[in-house]
Image: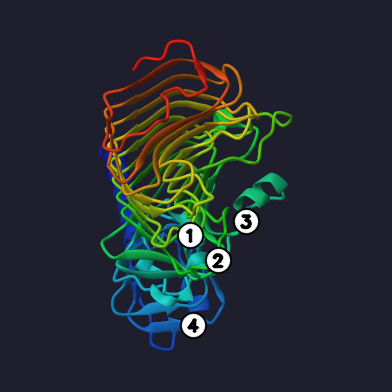
Amino acid sequence: MKNITPLISKIITLAVFFLFANSTIAASKEITDSKNCDMSTFFKRTNTSYIIKYSHNISGKAITIPEGCKIIFKGGRITNGTIHLKNTSLEGTVKLTGCLLKGKLKNNYLRAAWICHKDGKKDDAKLINAAIDVCQHIIFDKGTYSLSSTYKAPGNDRTIVEATKDNHIGINQSNVTLEGEKGAILLTKEEGKGIICIYSKPNDIKNSIKNITVKNITFQTKKKNTIFHEQAHCIKVVGVNGLVISGCTINNFYGDAICLGHFGDTPQTGERARNMNVIIKNNLIDGKDHNNRNGISIINGQDVKIENNVIRRTSAKNMPGAIDIEPNNSAYTINNIYITNNHITECNGGVGAIAIVANAKGGPAHNVFISGNHIEKSRRGFFFQVKSNNTTSNIQVENNYVDKNTDPYIFDGEGTSHSWIFRGNTFQKKTRNKIGGKINISDLKK
């Protein structure tokens, strides 16, 4: 009798072990689909691996994948439908061309080639927008992703709808990375449309979306050279805390290549969003025909670094220039802006290749550092405008180079300001313009 209890215990332990083992085996069992399989009924079990060996055009139907499954592509494909993922893993040579993905992908990244046509013809914008909600790291393989459909912001907030309309891709959540491999092109053929809008909710600066990265992507607009759309920005940013745009090529845009923008705030509405901790570096910005607004606009920004970019052939004659700091009124923030080591050439802007416009509406500009930039073959190197008292301070312009084909600078306005440094710059062309102009700068160092 004494040995019965230990024996029973061992039997129970073994039974539990085999039950667990069998359930694990069942959960990981691979199922190969047949050539004539009905995809709407094929995925039944949770935590199961399914092998796709054949092609399945689901023709607009919706498929729901049970929780925790793995789909392994071995020569087959699923195309042209909606697939609801539930912590699903995708493996093998994934082919889901034309499929709108919803839910949650377990993979740490999603390759745009898995779902997009990337043929430069069929619309990929809807597929990309859906993918961003499913997996926040999108890798764009070599190919041309044609964008024709426009993004519709979620919810009914008129401020957001107005700010994001006429863009193809929208990002309204934190920790999103859009990364291109060599030869990845986002192309819009649509007149007056922007490519990406990155935005937060208005009136909630403390909870702005964070940590957005856009890198190594070519942005291309096919436009009629005689048509001008000032507000159609290639990358528009409204209220982001933590943004890196690097290694990108932006070609032939309408408005700005990159706009650190706003929700149309006024002194009455107050500041509803702010762009903070932004790095724009190592990009090539080419306006091609000068029929655009600016290369980079900073209308609202705090702690912004613009460095080592090449900016060429930008700006219509009635537009500002290559890099334009222009707070429209006192509702905006311009503070801690660093513009360093950029190469600007052939800027036709009527203001200046690099400009600070603190205009009569009281737009502020504080702690702006402009150094080591090379400007050539442009209408003017620098433009500074101050028309409201005490709206600007600590502006440092040092060690920049402006070639003999470019007028060096103009200081415009009559407002008061203080703490300016304007020295160490090389101007190959002589000018009669006075450093400081009519601006009353109390302690200008030159």
Q: Nearer the viewer, residue 440 or 152?
A: 440
Q: Position of residue 352 (x, y in %)?
A: 44, 41
At x 72%, y 48%, the residue is 158
Q: Is 401 displayed left or right of 256 in the figure?
A: left
As shown in the figure, which amino acid type bears the numbered disc 1? Asn
Pointer 2: what residue?
227
As shown in the figure, which amino acid type bears the numbered disc 2? Ile
When the figure is inspected, residue 174 is found, relative to residue 386, above or below; the finding is: below
Mark positioned earlier in the residue sequence (1 or 4): 4
As shown in the figure, which amino acid type bears the numbered disc 3? Lys
Q: Quadrant of the N terminus?
A: top left
Q: Is 200 displayed left or right of 378 in the figure?
A: right
Calculate the distance from the C-alpha at mark 2 to the C-alpha at mark 1: 8 Å
Q: Is 106 displayed left or right of 41 in the figure?
A: left
Decide: few, some or many residues near mark 1? Use Cα within 10 Å; few <14, some 14-19, many ≥20.
Answer: many
> Which quadrant holds residue 232?
bottom right
Secondary structure at numbered mark 2: loop
Pointer 3: what residue?
165
Q: Is residue 49 in view from this perspective?
A: no
Pointer 4: what residue?
38
Pointer 1: what residue?
291
Mark positioned earlier in the residue sequence (4 or 3): 4
At x 26%, y 24%, the residue is 424
Secondary structure at numbered mark 1: loop
Decide: few, some or many residues near mark 3? Use Cα within 10 Å; few <14, some 14-19, many ≥20.
Answer: some
Secondary structure at numbered mark 3: loop
